[in-house]
Amino acid sequence: MILRKEQVWVLLRLGMGWIFLWAFFDKLFGLSFATTPDKSWLAGGSPTYGFLKFATYGPLASFYHSLAGSVVVDWLFMLGLLGIGTALILGIVTRIASYAGIIMMILMWSALLPPKNNPFLDEHIIYALVLLSLSTVRAGQWFGLGKWWSKTRLVKKYPILE
């Protein structure tokens, strides 16, 4: 079976959307994958503290350590995960979601410099490249709400919202 390019873009968009949404739900509820229930956001834990305080290393580590446990950083991170994931899954606002995801991936990459298994490249950069590609192909047009969304008055007035 050979996939058409539209099908590949749909799989990439949904896959990236699920990566962001899953991280949101795991940190919110503590589903015991990356976050245990007692450290979930709903249980009063910080979704960013463990990573920013203990996992970061390299030249920017002190900067990221200073952000650990910040309520503002927690809210921005969680809203980012939810917004990016939801937009990509639904196929709406995919350009902005992709740009926001690129920023998040670059920030996460910069918290782990140099990457442990490669002098430069890791999955965060690959994810950023996938998101950059999604931002250029109108990825929400296939198997999503993108066709409908692009016809709304708001998107016609502000095409960046596509």
Image: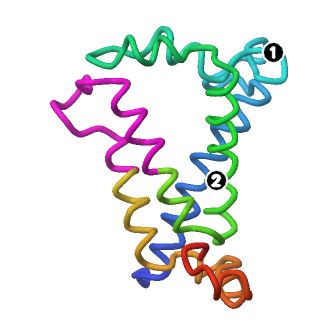
- Among all residues in the image, which is located at the extreme left? 119
Q: Is residue 38 left or right of residue 114?
A: right
Residue 148 vs residue 74, the one in the foreground: 74
Q: Amino acid at mark 2?
A: Gly
Q: Secondary structure at mark 1?
A: loop
Snapshot quadrant of residue 109: top left
Picture residue at 43% right of the left edge, 80% below the top:
3
Could you tell me residue 90's position as x and y percent?
69, 68
Above or below for 29 versus 147: above
Picture residue at 48% right of the left edge, 42% below the top:
104
Dot 2 crowding, Cα within 10 Å, few <14, some 14–19, many 20+: many
- Among all residues in the image, which is located at the extreme front? 157
Question: Pointer 2: what residue?
Answer: 85
Residue 63 vs residue 29, the one in the foreground: 63
Quadrant the C terminus occupies? bottom right
Could you tell me residue 8's position as x and y percent?
45, 73
Magenta segment, which residues?
Answer: 102-127
Q: Secondary structure at mark 2?
A: helix
Residue 1 vs residue 91, the one in the foreground: 91
Mark 1 and mark 2: Cα distance apart in space: 23 Å
Say whether residue 155 is magenta. no
Picture residue at 69% right of the left edge, 42% below the top:
79
Q: Amino acid at mark 1?
A: Gly
Question: Pointer 1: what residue?
Answer: 44
Say whether residue 106 is magenta. yes
Snapshot quadrant of residue 137: bottom left
Could you tell me residue 156's position as x and y percent?
64, 88
Residue 112 at least partly seen? yes
Dot 1 crowding, Cα within 10 Å, few <14, some 14–19, many 20+: few
